[in-house]
Amino acid sequence: MEIAVIKPTFSDRFNLRILVFAGLLLVLIGYPVYVYLDGVMSGGVKDLGNGVKFVDLKFMSSFVFDQANGKQEDVPAQWRELNGKKVVLEGEIWAPYAAGNEISSFQLCYSVAQCCFSGPPQVQHFVNTATKDGAPVPYFGGKVRVVGTLKVEVKRDAEANKVGSVFELELENISPVD
């Protein structure tokens, strides 16, 4: 007497709920890993052609910097090399003293809500941004994409006796990120 072995079908082994759960888990874990690895592999800078660089603002601001006595040499070389270059940055506007629908200067941070979990905000987390001629641009809530010329120069705030800025951007264009 032979015993018949019944092989379960694919649909008996995996139902739709398991496949949806596995797909969701893959997206929730896979996408952040992809974003991180993409930043690590590119060094936070991607060449867009025509001398324009896309710079990951989170990578650019994630270095240790002495807030009181930092010097130009303390800024990593890969960021100093961007001095005078046309760049594209994405982040959020921080303009606590602005009122109205238009602004001519602001600070750009990769995320106002998430930038500073490890302590107080650091000067390198913000890019001082202003239009070339002081002309106002629209204020956008949420994430924005800015294009302009980056200046990497450690400037001291004599009144506060500390570093006042590391990055400045001469703004050419601003638009919301969908």
Image (spheres, rainbow, N blue to C red):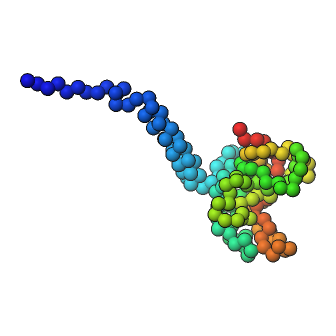
Residue 38 seen in render: no
**Whole-percent x, y for residue 79 in the image:** 68, 61
Q: On screen, 16 above or below 162?
A: above
Residue drawn at x 91%, y 48% is 135
Residue in the foreground of this view, choosing between 107 and 70: 107
- The answer to which image quadrant residue 44 occupies is bottom right
In depth, the one of 138 and 117 nearer the eye is 117
Q: Splitting the image into 4 quarters, where does residue 3 fall?
A: top left
Q: Who's the residue at 67% across and 54% down the image?
A: 114
Quadrant of image for the N terminus: top left
Q: Is residue 116 visible in this depiction of the protein?
A: yes
Give the number of callouts. 0
150 and 123: which one is in front? Answer: 123
Tell me residue 152's x, y (percent). Answer: 75, 62
Left-right relation of 13 to 67: left
Q: Is residue 91 left or right of residue 138?
A: left
In this picture, is 59 found above or below 73? Answer: above
